[in-house]
Amino acid sequence: MRFNTLFFLLILSCVCLALAQVPYDNCCLKYVRSMKPAAQKHAVKYRHQMTDGGCNIPAVIFTMRKGRIICTDPNETWVKDLMKKIDERPWKLSDMQHRRHSRRG
């Protein structure tokens, strides 16, 4: 009887450790419906979220200047337009950070 209890506790602890090591994806769970044009100009980059793994919805994830993340519907017209604007910008994120730090001088 003692061996069965010890064996059960050993198996249970192994399962708990295995579950604790599973990486959870940083996924969008819902969309922002719209973004004002004044806020759109603060978007510096974007990435696509696919519906694989733990992510249930496709999304375009915009990163704003101060690091805030906005999840949007990739089928919306304004999202596609904002992605084009970001792609067409002559400066990159590293250039913007360099400019921001050089002003403090």
Image (cartoon, grey):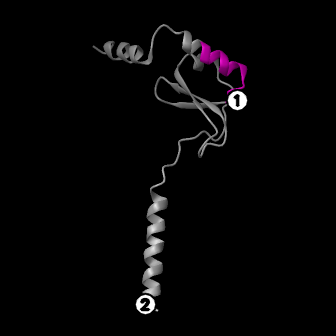
Tag 1 residue: 33
Q: Residue at x 37, y 16 (%)?
A: 100
Tag 2 residue: 2
- Residues 42 and 1: in front is 1
The percent position of residue 67, horizontal first and vertical second, equals: 47, 29
Q: Secondary structure at mark 1?
A: loop
- Residues 84 and 44: in front is 84
| Precedes in sequence: disc 1 or disc 2 | 2
Checking the image for residue 56, the label placed there is none
- Residues 38 and 6: in front is 6
Q: Is residue 85 above or below residue 63?
A: above
Q: Residue at x 48, y 7 (%)?
A: 90
Numbered label tally: 2
Which residue is situated farthest in the left direction here?
A: 105
The main secondary structure of the magenta stretch is helix
The percent position of residue 32, horizontal first and vertical second, equals: 66, 31
Quadrant (top left/top right/bottom left/bottom right) for the C terminus: top left
The type of residue carrying mark 1 is: Arg
The percent position of residue 18, horizontal first and vertical second, equals: 46, 61
Q: Which residues are magenta?
A: 73-84
Q: Residue at x 41, y 15 (%)?
A: 96
Image quadrant where residue 88 sits: top right
Q: Residue at x 53, y 41 (%)?
A: 26
The magenta stretch spans residue 79:
yes
- Residues 96 and 51: in front is 51
